[in-house]
Image (cartoon, coloured by chain):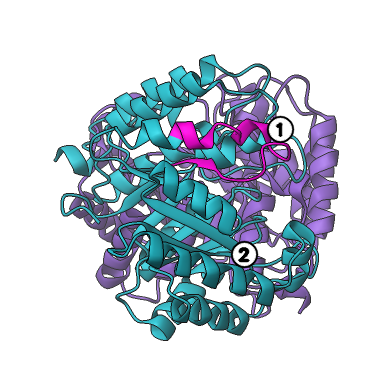
Chain colours: A cyan, B purple
Amino acid sequence: MRKDIDILVHEVGPRDGLQSIDTIFLTEAKLEWIRAEAAAGVPQIQVGSFVRPDLLPQMADSAEVVRESIKIPGLTVSALVPNLKGAQNAIAAGAHQLGVVMSVSEAHNKSNINRTVEESLDGFRQIVEYRNEADPDRKTVISGGLATSFGCTISGPVPVSDVMRQAERLLELGADRLNVADTVGFANPKQVKDLFDELFRTVGDDVPVGAHFHDTRGLGLANAFAAVEAGVRELDSCLGGLGGCPYAPGASGNVVTEDMVFMLEAMGLKTGVDLDALLETRELMVRHLKDEPTQGTFVTAGPPLGFVPATAA
Amino acid sequence: MRKDIDILVHEVGPRDGLQSIDTIFLTEAKLEWIRAEAAAGVPQIQVGSFVRPDLLPQMADSAEVVRESIKIPGLTVSALVPNLKGAQNAIAAGAHQLGVVMSVSEAHNKSNINRTVEESLDGFRQIVEYRNEADPDRKTVISGGLATSFGCTISGPVPVSDVMRQAERLLELGADRLNVADTVGFANPKQVKDLFDELFRTVGDDVPVGAHFHDTRGLGLANAFAAVEAGVRELDSCLGGLGGCPYAPGASGNVVTEDMVFMLEAMGLKTGVDLDALLETRELMVRHLKDEPTQGTFVTAGPPLGFVPATAA
């Protein structure tokens, strides 16, 4: 992580937000968003997903978006890859970081990507081996993503021991870092703190660990705070909470980037992000939307009187 | 606090929610709400405010609402009182607990109730003296409320030392308990944890302390969690977040009761509240509204699969 920030905000909107909405963003619209948000100081952006274009047309231009995004000075460009083929394409495009996600819940993994967890772990191994060959300096970072770490819509509660075992397996197979996700918005802050405490005890404090929360039950920021309390220093979020809607059951998106940045900066943690520029980026993004709602409170409430962001202090 | 709960949820909707909206609830509508919410297990409800009726017509029936509410078995009935006259009326009506609120911020207190903080403290002293005479057994509990403890819309940041000094003064003057309020929605969870840590160091762990958060910047539940982490065991909230609206700058209400109860129960803390019955109460309350929006996510998202509330466990 950069030395001038205390915590890394990983914007996932151009991937997680866009893949949840109907409006197709043109490549240039995505890049306008990504460039503006990088200029606002967001250090890492997940710009696309290397899935089959016929399955997710919204992500069909991911290679081009990666190729252009890596030209932005200082930005870490991440992309989601579901399998070896996706990893090959993402590495060819020049992605700095590959996110490889599988569920801890066997039932969810099977339902979501039609693989057993063991098959997913084998796929992960192949991706690491390919990266090690194609990129002997291992500049391309591989993040092992643990979906449904806090519960599953199919099988319910997920044992912490399962998350630990899978985290250890991913590290054994060569993951450079981990991302622990509340994929379906089940987590509560005590559970978050306990799980990350246990994770750092299990894998050690040296492994970079990110957290990914959804705001399905209004606990996204509480969970983000709990993760920070436990020592997490990388958080995923989505500008304007794109892809989420509190009025539609089940359709709720990621933690809102601008609200989370406000929280972190108010807590004295430097994110490197300029909140005014972030809100301008939000406006740029919103202009491309059709009927999709956005979320968030900071955009209307603004900063408290006398607020001094940590980054500016 | 009752022995069968870990944390006390103090519903303030019939006061803080209703005083922020245009629709006038008839006395019977308020009582229907209060009775249903008490039956759902909420142990304490702020049912009214003994202000001048011409200033706040919504609260004109507070004496009658108190007189009826104290007939509900097991319910602690609290009421806000701005001055001695209000306290006399509230005690005459039979309120179990009086909330006497003043701002820590001198400018806010002056603007809000046209008194200096010193004048408010003197008014507090008069209320305690009256209670001690009228109710020698001191069954009527007096809560000293510290508004703007986390910041002020007029003067900005509020020093923690000012909060501590005022808390000590209130206790010296005879407050039975304290309520620390983020009246204008400025708080962040680190600030909350630090302030309550300092408060318990200052006044000791034996003083019952409640916390009152607004969700102006999306941090209401994160702040509630931080308060619980610091040892707070009483939290104010408002069913359906009544009185708040995220789309209107500045008009944002209390933490949403049902979302907070879900969070606490998911964290393993018994509130004594039945979430299904609470949602039914919400429906009853909503039927009396005209155009006012309600807030909250639990009402649409429902519980996670396999969720077992602590109270039912």
Q: Identify the residue under disc 1.
A: B61
Residue A63 among those drawn in magenta: yes
The N terminus of chain B - image quarter: bottom right
Judge whether B253 appears above or below A28 on screen.
below
Residue lying at the far front in this picture: please name it: A133
Q: Are the residues at dot 1 and dot 2 in contact (C-beta closer than 8 Å)?
A: no
Tell me which segment is drawn in magenta. A46-65
Closer to us: mark 1 or mark 2? 2
**Horizontal relation, residue B154 to residue A144: left or right:** left
Q: Can marks 1 and 2 be said to lie on one chain?
A: no
Q: Which residue extends farthest left?
A: A313
Image height check: is B225 above or below A261?
below
Q: What residue type is labelled 2?
A: Met
Badge 2 is on which residue? Answer: A102
| Residue A76, magenta (yes or no) | no
A277 left or right of B34 in image: left
Question: Is residue B180 found left or right of B17 in the rendered image?
Answer: left
Query: Mark 1 and mark 2: span between their CA atoms?
Result: 58 Å
Q: Quadrant of residue B295?
A: top right
Badge 2 marks a residue whose secondary structure is strand
- Give residue B236's position: percent from left, percent from top: 55, 52
Residue at position x 44%, y 18% from top? A284
Q: Position of residue A184 (x, y in %)?
A: 67, 56
Query: Whole-percent x and y of residue A154?
Result: 80, 64
The residue shown at (32%, 39%) is A42
Residue type at mark 1? Asp
